[in-house]
Image (cartoon, helix red, strand yellow):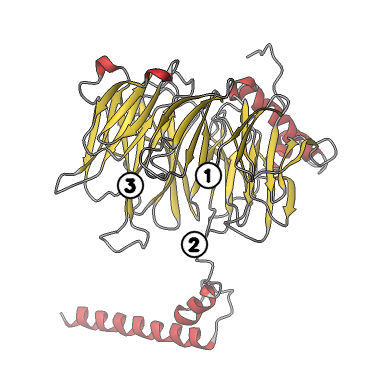
């Protein structure tokens, strides 16, 4: 695939206590990133979905909008008592939430960034992850809607002065998610109440087609739902979470994964082959398959197609995170948070493991927009020590590492994946890189050198909590060692001899019983 425009350079935003700065992305010429923009004081920062604009919250209640082509400030808003702010996907609108003193105060304001004028205002009593941002947009900003009491309100995205132009009545609705590409459907969640089961429903965004849902699934034991639409807006994944696990197998409650399609072909549970929670679920960039990490530790990872049939098993291990690269060729299976940071890099097209690595204490992780690099970051306030950034190649080899006294944020500047070379060209460039890396070894043919870059894959060990560092020793003392080469303690040897005597006694009793008969 040929591109008329050159691929954009990769850029990274890093935010420290003194403010944020913009790096030039890899590959680095001298092994270190250059500085695109020096530190700018701020309290928070966030790119728009398309990466065209950057929203920066300053300590003096100012919100500044930057043009990401040259990182020049294009607009500044002075908003007292602001609690939250969000950019629309294309950076056309700024949405703010302020403290209020009376219900008459319209504390949610939608601003036109070009003119700096407020174009829509409303009152919202509280704010949570399910209700912010108040007005949702599709990726092209052609469709917009808002969750209100017992209904969804739809706007004319070209003229918000009209207010909402039609409404969709859904009694008891608690959460909604508008599909992104395209914004043709909206998912709604209604919690269970008075013996009536909870439900997830899908409605078209077209007013004339909203007489009834195109898909619906009812279920019990659910307090919250997380939605995930695919690219193409014809498949929806819903993770239903209950605060309490009635089987008493998990302290963190229980979760189920449901899959619904807009054509009504599938409205049910995803067939997961291992019991336990759903840790992570991600659609590929094509929207034709999705990956799920699930089950009690060691967790299992499976890739399903859009018909909800399992395509490929990624094995088990101490994992709770999965990330597709933007091209859909590679994916990273990892265990972050309270897990030890093991990472497995897979080539999905060739169905093979291409490398492993480790990134302890990682809080955030994501592929670069071109799909060649994988970045992890250890950030505050989640962790106050060992803050830093690690960048890995597609096969898990460490490319770059930088430590900080305190780091609050590290993320790639968003770019459209189609602006970079396609999967075939990416694979060829990466293949040549692997050959160059192995040339230094000076042994074998070119094909054998390429194979040596793939690290030996070991079966992942069972998960052990961080506080149980002496678990192996305790297990050995109680139940004996795991092999003849291990040095057993006195208690382990004594327990092993007892078990051997018990087995001999049972065998003798069984043989005497058989001869007696």
Q: Nearer the viewer, mark 1 or mark 2?
A: 1
Q: Around disc 2, counting alpha carbons within 10 Å, would you say few (fewer than 14), some (14 to 19), or many (20 or more)?
A: some
Q: Name the quadrant of the N terminus.
A: top right
Q: Around disc 3, counting alpha carbons within 10 Å, would you say few (fewer than 14), some (14 to 19), or many (20 or more)?
A: some
Which residue position holds label 3? 224
* Residue 481 visible in the snapshot: yes
Tell me the element at label 1.
loop
The residue located at (39%, 45%) in the rendering is 126
Tell me the element at label 2.
loop
Which residue position holds label 2? 463
The residue located at (35%, 80%) in the rendering is 503
Circles 1 and 3: CB atoms closer than 8 Å: no
Position of 468 relative to 432 (above/below): below
Which residue position holds label 1? 81
Q: CA distance from mark 1 to mark 2?
A: 45 Å
Q: Indicate the position of residue 75 as horizontal and vertical percent values.
A: 64, 27
Would residue 94 appear left or right of 230 to someone viewing this image? right
């Amino acid at each position: 695939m040929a591109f008329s425009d050159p691929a954009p350079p990769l850029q990274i935003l890093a935010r420290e206590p003194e403010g944020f700065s913009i790096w030039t992305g890899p590959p680095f010429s001298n092994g270190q990133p250059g500085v695109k923009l020096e530190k700018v004081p701020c309290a928070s920062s966030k790119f728009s979905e398309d990466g065209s604009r950057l929203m920066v919250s300053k300590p003096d209640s100012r919100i500044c909008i930057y043009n990401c082509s040259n990182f020049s400030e294009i607009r500044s808003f002075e908003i007292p008592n602001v609690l939250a702010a969000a950019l629309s996907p294309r950076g056309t609108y700024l949405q703010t939430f302020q403290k209020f003193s009376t219900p008459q105060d319209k504390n949610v304001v939608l601003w036109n960034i070009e003119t700096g004028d407020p174009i829509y205002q409303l009152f919202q009593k509280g704010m949570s992850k399910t209700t912010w941002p108040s007005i949702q947009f599709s990726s092209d900003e052609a469709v917009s809607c808002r969750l209100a009491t017992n209904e969804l309100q739809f706007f004319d995205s070209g003229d918000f002065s009209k207010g909402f132009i039609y409404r969709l009545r859904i009694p008891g609705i608690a959460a909604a998610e508008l599909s992104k590409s395209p914004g043709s459907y909206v998912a709604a969640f209604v919690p269970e109440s008075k013996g009536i089961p909870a439900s997830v429903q899908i409605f078209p965004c077209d007013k004339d087609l909203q007489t009834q849902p195109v898909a619906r699934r009812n279920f019990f034991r659910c307090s919250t739902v997380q939605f995930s639409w695919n690219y193409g807006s014809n498949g929806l994944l819903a993770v239903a979470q209950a605060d309490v696990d009635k089987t008493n197998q998990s302290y963190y409650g229980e979760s189920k994964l449901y899959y619904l399609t807009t054509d009504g072909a599938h409205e049910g549970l995803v067939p997961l082959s291992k019991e336990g929670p759903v840790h992570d679920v991600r659609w590929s960039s094509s929207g034709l398959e999705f990956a799920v990490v699930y089950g009690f530790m060691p967790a299992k990872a499976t890739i399903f197609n859009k018909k909800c049939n399992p395509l490929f098993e990624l094995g088990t291990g101490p994992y709770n995170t999965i990330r597709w690269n933007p091209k859909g060729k590679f994916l990273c299976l990892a265990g972050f948070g309270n897990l030890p940071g093991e990472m497995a890099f897979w080539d999905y097209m060739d169905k093979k493991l291409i490398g492993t690595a480790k990134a302890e204490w990682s809080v955030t992780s994501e592929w670069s927009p071109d799909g060649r690099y994988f970045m992890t970051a250890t950030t505050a306030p989640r962790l106050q020590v060992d803050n830093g950034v690690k960048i890995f190649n597609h096969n898990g080899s460490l490319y770059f590492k930088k430590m900080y006294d305190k780091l609050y944020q590290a993320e790639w500047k968003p770019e459209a994946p189609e602006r970079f070379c396609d999967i075939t060209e990416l694979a060829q460039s990466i293949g040549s890189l692997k050959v160059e890396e192995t040339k230094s070894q000076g042994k074998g043919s070119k094909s054998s050198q390429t194979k040596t870059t793939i690290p030996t894959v070991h079966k992942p060990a069972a998960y052990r909590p961080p506080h149980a560092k002496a678990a192996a020793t305790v297990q050995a003392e109680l139940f004996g060692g795991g092999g003849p080469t291990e040095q057993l303690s006195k208690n382990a040897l004594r327990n092993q001899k007892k078990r051997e005597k018990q087995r001999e006694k049972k065998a003798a009793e069984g043989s005497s019983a058989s001869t007696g008969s």
